[in-house]
Amino acid sequence: MPVMESVKASVNGTKAAVNLYAVLRNLEELCRLDPASIALIQGKLHTIRFKIRGGPAADLVIADGEVSMQEPAGASSIVLYFRSPEHFNKMIEGKANPIPLRGLTRRGFLTTDFTKLTQRLEYYLKPDDVLLKDPDYFAIHTRLLLNTAAYAVACIGNYDEIGRRIAARIPDGVISISIEESGQQVFLRALKGRLQAMKSAPAAPSAYMVFDTVQSANDVLSEKADVHELIVTERLKLKGMLPMIQHMNDILAKVPQFV
Amino acid sequence: MEPNKYTNSRLLFERAMKVIPAGVYGHLGPVEGSMIPPSAFPFFAREAKGAYFWDVDGNRFIDYMCAYGPNILGYRDDDVDQAARAQGELGDCVTLPSVKMVEFAEQLVATVHSADWAFFAKNGGDVTSFALMIARAATGRNKAVLVNKGYHGVAAWTKLAGNSGIAPEEIANNLYVDWNNIGQLEALISAYPGQIACFIASPYFQGNFVDNQLPEQEYWQKVRSLCTKHGIVLIIDDVRCGFRLDLAGSDHHYGFEADLICFCKALANGYNVSALCGKDELKSAASSVFYTGSYWFSAVPFAAGIATLNKLKAIQAPQRLQELGSRLTSGLAGVAAGHGIDLRISGELPMWYMRIANDPSQVLHQEWIAACVQRGVFFTNHHNHFINAALTEEDIAFTLEVADDAFRAVKKMHPELEGVS
């Protein structure tokens, strides 16, 4: 995950990191799973650089029918500048616009297809009771929810003042978070107090958090279930170096403050 | 061996979940990391006697957790229970304290090497918190030095930043050093001159998920010297070790004197009382802190405590626990070695800690512990264990048989280990 060391450990700074690295990153997965989103990026070639003064930065690379979030490098076709993390957060909430520094000729893509793409993301991240009854919607929604949680934990552990103190207590190693039913697996690596979320394991995990079904994962992540009951009934299995998971959960509890 | 079944435990837990937060909360709860996987463990006990408890499904366990420490003589010890019953017939929680309170304090002062006085409460956390307050009252300073990953109860001041329900201000005066690290303690004393009220630590390091560590040579003597030189109150949290290493206190065991020493757990063999003992020079500060509780003067636990200390002396409990611990842990390590497994034993043997070192994730260890529990030997995954004086040679032999069978079961789950040994 790209991280700017200069980002202030403020609520807005942390929130901007979560919005960029955890929420917007979901476009990667969305454009693999959602046919409508896939159609929006077909044949498109753009690199959108998010440049936030005093905040995080990232390139969103759209190429070959895929989206990937990368560390800013080289030239970008579009540069969106934000005066502050707060400005960026307001844009995410739909209450402000970015300042385009480059790519004015590509404004059409930003205002049409990319806007539609972010609307698809919002559609999957903000469910209602009717949508949740659709199995396909539910599967994608939960997948994005788990990714968001893992990446948000990393952001909060790296940016938020209390989050950093908790992250410093996580023993070095890799936590695996997975759903048996869907096969989804995300990882959180702790190394000397820094956290990194990723979708492939850099080393053998030291701790495991395994949901039996997509429903169990969704129930926990959307705070609809009693986690204790799930653990005791082993619908959520924990094993290995549990202090890693316990400390991670202290950070996870802070996610609603920033999303 | 046929693994246990826990049908009634599960049904009772379902009822508990409806009316009790987390079903079973705190350190006895199945989600707190000491029962992995929960399905291998019973959740509720029906009865206990000696070294055993029986769960609500009728399964018997040799109990190496001893209620997490209180059971030192054996559950429902006849002599302790008789003393408690006799006092119960006279009165327990009354408007005035009983003679037993004074007698118990006199006995503690006579038994505990560093004690000039004793104060009673209910739980270990009551007296560690009181010790901190006394240190502040005596020194007029606010800061406390604690050891990283140490445990002193569940009061707000013992928690860490980010823990649920804790405001940053509640822990703002805590400073931390690593265990056995004199240099860090010296650095803190230099960085906060005249601001540190106390240094609080257990007699040796009893962290979870890590090997326990004994004090290095002269560690405690150096700490004592620094505390004396800088007017810092030295508090020993002997809640877990108290009376298992040395009836005169674990500070005595390691050759130094605490200013304040906290006891609970083994103090009354399961009757609910804790004690803070201290030096004369802190008695006035202790008196100045208004600190009390509805049940802190109950006479029955005092009577039980007196009988417990008498019996611990009579049977020379620390020596006996050491011998039993030595036989058990060497046996366990030997059985493990026979399977090509490296079972590491650490800490003091009456409260040994163990882990399988072959697997850094400790999943293998968790599977072996689960297999032992399912066969009637109650260990937990990542906490130190406890020896009690009711344990017999037959119990140890049975434990080793179970451990052996459990290793065989684990190796079946892990074909990669089959070729080993």
Image (cartoon, coloured by chain):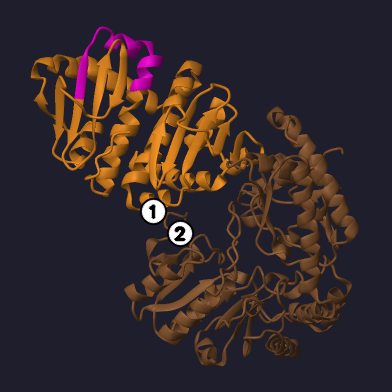
Compared with residue B375, is residue A76 higher up or lower down, i.e. above or below?
A: above
Residue type at numbered disc 2: Leu
Picture residue at 63% right of the left edge, 87% below the top: B115
Q: Nearer the viewer, residue B46 or B393?
A: B393
Residue at 14 percent of width and 14 percent of height: A108
| A33 drawn magenta | yes
Q: Which mark is residue A165?
A: 1
What residue lies at 73% left-to-right and 65% top-to-bottom?
A: B350
Residue lying at the far right in this picture: please name it: B394
Q: Quadrant of the C terminus of chain B?
A: top right
Q: Which residues are magenta?
A: A28-48
Front in this rendered view, residue B126 or B226: B226
In the image, residue A196 sits, relative to residue B312, either above or below, namely: above
Between B253 and B52, the one lying in front of the other is B253
Q: Amino acid at mark 1?
A: Arg
Q: Chain of mark 2?
A: B
Whether labels 2 and 1 belong to a single chain: the reply is: no
Q: Is residue B285 left or right of residue B255?
A: left
Q: Secondary structure at mark 2?
A: loop
Looking at the image, residue B25 sits to the left or right of residue B107; the answer is: left
Query: Any mark on residue B160, and which?
Result: 2
Chain colored brown: B
Quadrant in the rendering for residue B271 = bottom right
Chain for numbered disc 1:
A
The answer to whether residue B277 is above or below residue B320 is below
- Quadrant in which the N terminus of chain B appears: top right
Q: Which chain is orange?
A: A
Q: Is residue A170 in sight in this rendering?
A: yes
